[in-house]
Image (cartoon, rainbow, N blue to C red):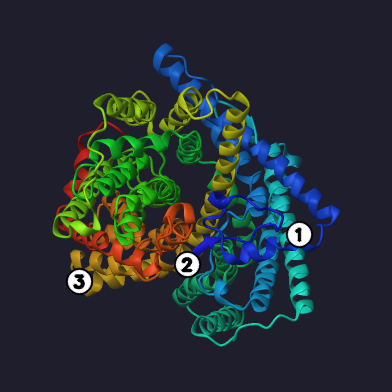
Amino acid sequence: MTTTSLQHPENTGDVEEDIAVGESDALLREDTEEETAPLWERFITKISSVSAIAAGIAIVILGLQIVADASGRTFFNVPLPGTLELVSNWWMVLAVFLGFGFTQFKGEHIRVTLLVEKLPVTWRTAVETVILAASLGIVGLLAYYLTVDAIDSVEAREMLAGSFPLPIWPIAVFMALGTWLYAAQLLVSLTSSLRAAKRERRSGVAQPALLSAQNVLLAIAVVASLVIVVLLLSVEMSRVAAGGLLIALMVLLLLCGLTTALAMIAAGGLGLWKLAGTSVVADAFESVPMHSAANWSLSVVPMFVLMGIVLWRTGLTGKVFYAARLWLGWMPGGLAVATNFSGAGLAAASGSTIGISYALGRMAIPEMLRAGYKPSLATGVVATAGTLGQLIPPSVLLVIYAGVAQVAVGPQLLAAIIPGIIVAVLYALVIIIQGLVRPDIAPRSKATGVPMAEKLRALVGIIPLVVVIFIVIFGMLSGIFTPTEAGAFGALAAIVVGSAFGEERKNPKQLFKTLGRSLQETVTATAGIFLLLIGVNLLGRAMTMSGVLRALTDWVVGIGMPTPVFLIAIMVLFLILGMFMESMSIILLSVPILAPVLMAVGVDMTWFGVFVVMLIELALVTPPVGMLTFIVHRLAQDKEVNLGHKISLIDVFKGVTPFVLMSIAFLIVLIFLPDIVTWLPSISAVK
């Protein structure tokens, strides 16, 4: 199971915020129940919060400047000078690095806890303490090199060359400060973990048996990691062999529970040292973080994230399900069909897989259970509807993929529209067929007497959300603004319509709180995403230097494996990886390795972006470990959701299985009919 990283024990968010937080985080949060955190810890956490506010302000300025520039250029032929330079080199960098510390406090840095979370409490606390100590060392080393770079930049009064000269040295200083704050927040988590360990020793509570299959696997992963580190440090080997060991080390560090980004940074740094020496490590640690964050094309990421969160927090997404239920409830499995198409609608507005599943689950599962639906179908359709979140644009995963694979963002987003719609329709067919074959699992709705006026009012209620979607999609297709600028217009539109038509529109104070909370969540999501990008770029340098990618490409081409067979093999691999790893981690880890091979065998990388995102999202619900199934199952344990029904994990797995099989069949169709993906980008002017 994949969860977020260890957070500060004082952070006790609500259920919505904790839905993806592992048991290890809950363990450390118990710290403050018995003792108050020291003053210095509270001071660091306060500074992290202030830093996050500054990051939020940078995101707001970023969005407003993009909107002002695109509007001036389109309507008055007067672009705003310096927009590209300021957005890329100032606002993006500040939004990323000033959010690191607060993201650690909130526990939003992504990690894999499949093995760690099953340990007995005492051992788990000990392992988490070691993980935090290792994390502190990695981040401290990164902060040191960024400090060295900042000092050099200040002394040279470094400026950005070009038509809009811009001082870079202040940003270099903030990068170093933000990373040191991240290290300080890790230190806070470490001391909290040590106190928890001390408390466990005092408690004398009997612990369950340590020996289990998962615990043995964790021990093997730890020992294997240490062996690989020793080999890399002390044994002469070929560059390709070193590259292979680095990949293995990174995967093992993930299994040991290290944050995904820090596992990549550690493996990448060690690899660069092995292959080229300390000077190359220093150069990479000083330059890669800036280049990873200062990216104009990826400025769409915080904007799309903000757009989705605002629409959800203001309650506009809930109106989609209500309208779908009224209009589609009469069909066989009508409420489930309504839930499915609501997921598609929310995907076009949000792009958050977990967020969609959580929002739909809260609304739809009780409604379906009241109507007599079997728990397996009720939970299964919620889980699979959530997988549309990263397929139908706007999709943060597709944007990240485009950046990693070096393909244009606009065509990549457009390429997913038709497959996304087809998948939603196929899911609806699966539901209808089940309803026809087995009417007992999905009784037809009895609510046939809903007045037409009420149905029309429900449609009117979704107009604000449709307007936001229309602005984003039509703006890109018409060329009014670029795909990068579309995110800023979408975020602004979401804020405007959310303020005007959302649940808190008559309560300005509560509305302001909602928008502030949305911005806070955007900061943590942005910082977590870009720390991953820093990690993958550092690891990518080491992989390129090792030559392992070239060797893999030559091997695949040399054995003459047919392209369809190769792609089906990738399907199996990604379905397995998706059971254990977070979606973005898979893309950042695998795409740089596979891209040369795919291009060598003639695979269109824009097509592969849609293919791989579908695979990763499908893996989230694939038994026996799909993360989204666990999240929906956990949500279904709430009495307000299950209405007294006993819903087991097996029920959820039964519910998702027909959708998984349909999705696999459609993926195979895409292999042989790639035009389903590539047609729309080919006729569009979007670049």
Label 3 or label 2, whichever comes before in sequence order: 2
Query: With 642 as the anchor, is 178 left or right in this view?
Result: right
Mark 2 is on which residue type? Met
| Figure check: 654 above or below 146 | below
Mark 3 residue type: Gly
Name the residue at 19% across, 44% down: 331
How far is disc 1 from disc 3 in space, using C-alphas? 60 Å
Q: Position of residue 423 (x, y in %)?
A: 24, 50
Q: Nearer the viewer, mark 1 or mark 3?
A: 1
Relative to the observer, which residue lies in front, 463 or 307? Answer: 463
Find residue 118 and report its horizontal and vertical position in percent: 55, 75
Observer-nearest of 673 and 324: 324
Quarter of the view holding residue 53: top right
Dot 3: what SS?
Answer: loop
**Reading the chain from its start, which is encountered first: label 2 or label 1?**
2
Q: Are marks 2 and 1 in contact (CB under 8 Å)?
A: no
Q: Earlier in the sequence, mark 1 or mark 3?
A: 1
Q: Residues within 10 Å of mark 3 (few under 14, many from 20)?
A: few
- Quickly name the residue at label 2: 1
Q: Which mark, by number, is residue 560?
A: 3
Give the labeled residue for mark 1. 32
Residue 595 seen from this side: no
